[in-house]
Image (cartoon, rainbow, N blue to C red):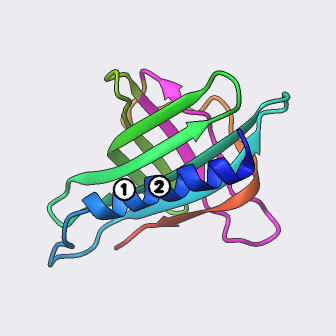
Amino acid sequence: MKPSTIILSLCAMFATVAATAGPAAATSPGDSTSGHGTFTTGGTATYRFVFHAKEKGDGTIMGRARIFDNDALNLDIEVNCLTISGNTAIIGGTDAGSTSYAFKVTDNGGGSTPDRITLPQNGQTCATFNTLGNFALATGDVEVHDEP
């Protein structure tokens, strides 16, 4: 996939999410996380991702995640769970086939230590997620906001 096609796909996904997001709740905005970029697991595949997740004022979780490579992985996840502790977030949801996935990100603050991400794990939720390994971002950024 050409870089320009990837960028257009990511822009289209963000536009769709923005258009379908409901009005903000009058209470605390809650925890949120977002990110985009690329990473490798040590093999030849380069994984690309874009995601956002937010806890609304009524406690519901909304968001989307897209994680793919140029070969076999192509996930579009509707986010329905979010767990944040400090600078780490676990994001989970289901794909179109109702398979559950969860993955974890760590926001290292944009300094010399890169942010980190795991591959989505099939059959996992925020409550059952177990880290198998995490990978430094090659490009991009992750932001995690743990609201009081």
Q: Residues within 10 Å of mark 1 (few under 14, many from 20)?
A: few
At 37% from the left edge and 72% from the top edge, which residue is drawn? 147
Note whether 51 is above or below 142 in the view shown. above
- Left or right relative to 29: residue 124: right
Q: Are marks 2 and 1 in contact (CB under 8 Å)?
A: yes
Q: Is residue 107 magenta?
A: yes
The magenta segment is 101-123
Q: Quadrant of the N terminus?
A: top right
What type is the residue that disc 1 sits on? Answer: Thr
Q: Residues within 10 Å of mark 2 (few under 14, many from 20)?
A: few
The label shown at residue 120 is none
Disc 1 target residue: 16
| Residue 39 screen position, x and y as percent | 74, 44
What type is the residue that disc 2 sits on? Answer: Ala
Disc 2 target residue: 12
| Residue 33 screen position, x and y as percent | 46, 61
